[in-house]
Image (tube, rainbow, N blue to C red):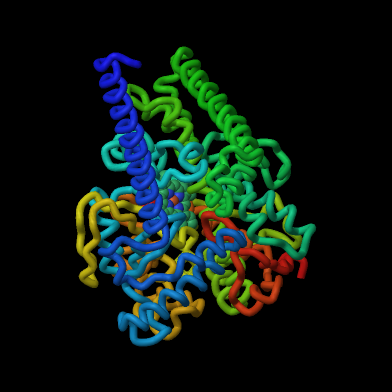
Amino acid sequence: MLPATLDSWIARAAASVSLMIHDHTMLVTTAAAIALLYAASRVHQFFVPPRALRHLPRAPVAVYLRWMLEGGGFLALNDAIMRAVREDALRKGLIASMEDTPRVYLRWFVGVWIVAVSNPDDTKTVFLNHELYEKGRINIGYARQFFGYNVAGAQTPDWKRQRKVVNPAFRRGWATSFFGDPARHLIANWDALGVVDPSQWMQRLTLDALSSAAFGHTMDSIHHPDNPMVTTYNRIIHNIFQQGPLLNPFYKLTPGAAQLRRDMKAFNDQIFVMIEAKTAERDRRRALGSGSGKVEDEDRRDLLDLMIDAQEGTTFSKEDLRSNTVVFFLAGHETTATALSFALYLLGMHPDVQQRARDEVIQVMGDLPSKPTPADQVPYPTVEQDRQFTFLNCVIKEVMRLYPSAPQLPMRITMAPSILSDGTHVPAQTHITVDMWALHHAREYWGPSNDKFNPDRWAETVLPDGSVPMQPGARGYTWAPFAGGQRICLGQQFSLVEQRVVLAMMLLRYEWTAVGDEDALRGHPRTAPSGLLRPDGVRLRMVRRDLV
Ligand code: HEM
């Protein structure tokens, strides 16, 4: 028999163990309940928008999921979304017919609800208040890791620091030879082909122009599409913008992700080598006493050179130089390739407009110098001639209205509560975008010919000196492919010069018609899976003008 004290001690111990077990069970049960509630609320947030935004029209999440899994291009998704959004808006009494576009609606991206504005008033507000509508940061997949913290993605305080260094690289003229030289290489290839895929070739041309302009060495992807730097870059971009893997929570453990990491490292190493070489070259020039190290031909100076100069005495690091160079690649070549591909396509669908554009080019530059003209002697406009195109600028504006390269403004996030023009209260920390596609196509702002290619609609905006204003305010913020406000595209001039030079050369060299698949021929080309619009299934039949 146990002594009484021991007995009571054991009883007390047993009671407290049982209490502990009970407490522990309680603890586990409570923790499990909290975890479950949290998971349920996350699932709920994933599929159901926040209460304050629930009144806005939206498409069911299934529409997005289906598209992400199928891997289609932007236009296929957008058609399906806008049909569902319009049906919902009609049900909610927000629009009068399926032809109308709601001023504000909701989009979805991997569980994030985004307020999309598609009217000029809110577009202007978002552009002009960039500290209230800050750059959003969704850290999914590998995009953030590859593009790093660059001027295009930075939030205000850091953006100001970055812009100081990057600005001088853009605030200057652009030598037309940056674009004329690769266009001649392209012409030499196209002469031998007859039927071409504009999208594929414009990607190559703009990559070569951009690599010359960005770091003074062309990637020469027109002649060498298999150049390892080109193929690595293309693979990275393809993999980063694939939507399907974003739905896989274990994506980063897959062999595909491992390959992507290896590619990013290889590409970045190359950029670092260039940065080192350029810095050493500048120091060498200085040591030899050649002034500040600046080269003679200012318009041919490359972006990296100018950034390396401007970064002296600032906190700009090598990683800042890398991430900005990388973002120039994405921002600077895909966008212009898209604009040029659609311009060639639309001119191929509208031979009358093509001829009027050609007449203007011949009037400004004269015709081809001889019959035949060797590819490397096809003239490109001088800087002076480039300033004299009026109709060509109207064509470019109309192309970028119908096919804005970036159909949605990169995501913003509200830093404080705000109210939109339709009275919607947007809470702080809400994601928001401008739907450039909807804005550029809405019947409300473009009339019944909203979906028609009509460069003459821009005639009334031409200034007395023949120039065509390209800022969004010139048409009340209904046209804004380069965005607006302080965060307007830094490369707008670069891209416009490139588009005019390349189109002028094509117009001199060829007459062409659009061929390709059924969608392209009926005027609704498909787009390839990509972060931007990229035509798919379009082909052009090119006929040399100097041989007829
Ligand atoms: C058709 C051609 C182009 C289009 C449609 C286009 C479009 C845009 C748009 C919509 C933005 C605003 C992004 C935002 O606010 O979130 C932007 C910003 C930017 N673009 Fe472009 N872009 C084009 C060409 C270029 C080129 C050729 C370069 C460089 C060589 C470039 C460099 C940049 C940079 C650095 C920014 C960030 C500016 C900032 O936030 O301060 N873009 N672009």
Toward the viewer: 266 or 279? 266
Quarter of the image for residue 459 reads bottom left
| Position above or below: 111 against 358 | above
Asked which quadrant contains residue 96, the reply is bottom left
Quadrant placement of the C terminus: bottom right
- Residue 396 visible from this viewpoint: no
Identified at 62% across, 32% down, the residue is 262
Tell me what residue is drawn at x 49 percent, y 60 percent. 405
Q: Is residue 188 above or below residue 145?
A: below
Which one is in front, 256 or 33? 33
Q: Is residue 222 left or right of residue 409?
A: right
- In which quadrant will I find the N terminus? top left
Residue drawn at x 40%, y 22% is 292
Residue 439 as seen in the image, left or right of residue 414: right
Spot the residue most to the front: 1
* Position of residue 439 measured from the top left corner of the image (x, y, whole percent): 38, 70
Please tell me how many numbered marks the rendered image carries.
0
Percent coordinates x, y for residue 273 in the rendering: 56, 24
Viewer-closest of 417 and 408: 417
In the rendered view, does 373 fall on the left or right side of 324? right
Residue 530 seen anywhere in this rendered image of the structure: yes
Residue 506 position (above or below residue 272)? below
The residue sitting at 44% across, 23% down in the picture is: 293
The spot of residue 426 in percent (x, y) is 24, 61
Residue 195 percent across, percent down from the top left: 75, 65
